[in-house]
Amino acid sequence: MKDIFTFRLNSYLYPFVMWIFVLYLILISAYTTRFIIQLKILNNIESYYDRQLNSFDKKGDTFENK
C-alpha cells in the first residue's frame, strides 16, 4: 500500500532551507556593515587627532606650556 502524506517533504524543506539561507546572508551583511562603519569611525577619529596635533605643531604651542 502506498503511503499518502498531506504534504510533500521536498516542498516543505525548500522554504525552510531558503529562510535559513536568507537569515545567514542577513547576518553576514549586518556584521560586514557594522565592521565597515567601525573602521570609518576609527579612521575619522585618527584623522581628527592628527589634525589637532598638526595645528599645535604649527602654532608652536605645547601641552607643557599651558
Image (cartoon, rainbow, N blue to C red):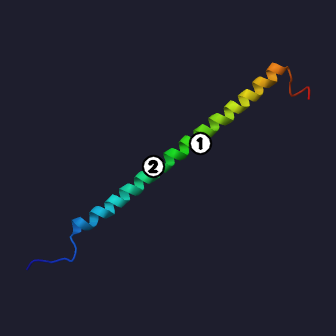
The x, y position of residue 16, in whole percent, is 32, 64
Residue occupying the point 51% across, 45% down:
33
Asked if the residues shown at circle 2 and circle 1 are in contact, with their CB atoms under 8 angstroms apart, the answer is: no
Residue 3 higher or lower than 43, as above or below: below
Residue occupying the point 28% across, 64% down:
13
Residue 6 higher or lower than 60, as above or below: below
- On residue 28, the disc is 2
Residue occupying the point 19% across, 77% down:
5
Q: Which residue is mark 1?
A: 38
The x, y position of residue 45, in whole percent, is 68, 36
Residue 37 higher or lower than 10, as above or below: above
Task: Please tell me which residue lies in front, 51 or 62.
Answer: 51
Judged left or right of residue 44, residue 33 is left
The x, y position of residue 27, in whole percent, is 46, 53
Residue 63 higher or lower than 36, as above or below: above
Residue most extreme to the bottom: 1
Dot 1 amino acid type: Gln
Tag 2 secondary structure? helix
